[in-house]
Amino acid sequence: MAPLDAGHAPTAVDRVTDAVRDEILSGALPADAPLREAAAAERYGVSRHTVRAAFQRLVAERLAVASPYRGVRVASFDRATIIALQHLRAALEVEAVRIANERFGAEWPDAVLAPARDALARLEASVDWLEAERIHAEIHRAIVAASGSPRIMEAHASLGSELLLFLLHVRPHYTLETLVAEHRELLADVQEVGPDAIRAHLEHSTRLLFGG
């Protein structure tokens, strides 16, 4: 999800996109569920043109797919898609941690760690899973940002809503408490152990979904 620019008032397209995105990421709209223009236009009190533009955004975010004769549906996020996403995350996050350790050694500066620690504190206080998923993603972005590499940070940020969709799928394997504990440990391990820590963390979440 791309945040609105400061001072940018939400448009009707923004509002519909946000509402449908939240339903997908909360699991209220399951995989392969149809997204119907007419029903959405009536529900949100907007034109079908507005709904069509909102659905196009969701397709661009990989939360929905559009195909001939089937229309727009919630993305299925199958095994191949999840594994491909995890491979991309590993390429970016492992390299980011390697660069950060090269810059700072086994103890990153407080200023570098502050965004991840702040997100971890908010995750601990969270009571809503959709909010927790977004904060979880912030922690990983903060770890990537420690690299100081603009291109890696940009590529990781572009995962956006697709990363949140992954977190929706892995949600049944966690409680908020175990999610907090695992990421507190991760924040220490990426400094002390380095790239292998983030690689093991991502492999663990993939195994939770598929076994092995």
Image (spheres, grey):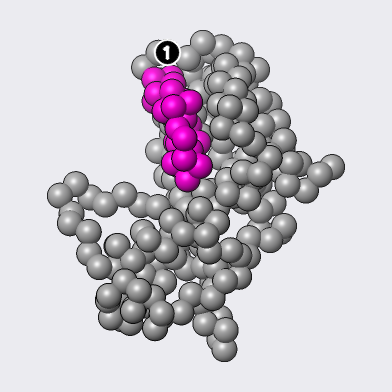
Task: Name the residue tied to disc 1.
Answer: 109
134 part of magenta stretch: yes
Res. 190 in view: no
Q: Secondary structure at mark 1?
A: loop
Above or below: residue 210 compared with residue 52: above
Above or below: residue 23 compared with residue 44: above
| Residue shown at the point (55%, 56%) measured from the top left | 27
Q: Which of the pair 44/181 is nearer the observer?
A: 44
Range of residues picked out in magenta:
112-139
Magenta span main SS:
helix
Q: Position of residue 192 (x, y in %)?
A: 61, 14
The amino acid sitting under disc 1 is Pro
| Residue shown at the point (71%, 43%) measured from the top left | 206
Q: Position of residue 12 (x, y in %)?
A: 25, 68
Above or below: residue 155 compared with residue 53: above
Q: Quadrant of residue 176?
A: top right
| Residue shown at the point (62%, 43%) measured from the top left | 171
